[in-house]
Image (cartoon, rainbow, N blue to C red):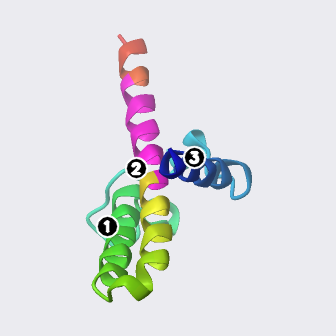
Amino acid sequence: MRAMEDVMACRAQQIFTHGHTPEKDREGDLWSPREFGAGGRRSIMRQLARQLATATEYASLGRAKHDVCRRALVRLAALCLAAIDWIDAEEAEDQVQP
């Protein structure tokens, strides 16, 4: 339960503190073949990959870095929610268009 609360709090922080609303996220790319895509921003999928790499790196350092690894995983999970919101918005848009 604590993990879900922390992920939802992180997602809320992304939205309300940093302005990463689903609408704003869609100004960038879900995926881009280059490091930086539309508007000089990393795609959501590249952000996910970087965050997973960070978590993996800290996990490899053992118990002493579990706290840092956990924070990275919470951010990763919140980014996953952002990517899901992005995809849901695209699908909803596709259903409206004839």
Whichever of labels 3 and 1 marks the residue nearer the N terminus, that label is: 3
Does residue 78 sit above or below 69 in this rendering?
A: above
- Is 75 one of the magenta-colored residues? no
Residue at left 32%, top 79%? Answer: 59
Residue at left 50%, top 45%? Answer: 4
Whichever of labels 2 and 3 marks the residue nearer the N terminus, that label is: 3
Whichever of labels 1 and 2 marks the residue nearer the N terminus, that label is: 1
Q: Quadrant of the rendered structure where residue 32 is?
A: bottom left
The main secondary structure of the magenta stretch is helix
Residue pointed to by mark 1 = 49
Residue pointed to by mark 3 = 5
- Label 3: state its secondary structure: helix
Q: Report the amino acid beneath label 2.
A: Cys
Q: Residues within 10 Å of mark 3 (few under 14, many from 20)?
A: few
Distance from Cα at disc 2 to Cα at disc 3: 15 Å
Query: Residue 20: where, in percent of width, then height?
Result: 61, 52
Does residue 58 sit above or below 2 in this rendering?
A: below
- Label 1: state its secondary structure: helix
Q: Report the amino acid beneath label 3.
A: Glu
Name the residue furthest right.
Answer: 17
Label of residue 16 in the image? none
Query: Residue 24: where, in percent of width, then height?
Result: 59, 47
Residue 47 or 60: which is nearer the viewer?
A: 60
- Which residues lie in the magenta part? 78-91
Residue pointed to by mark 2 = 80
Q: Report the amino acid beneath label 1.
A: Ala
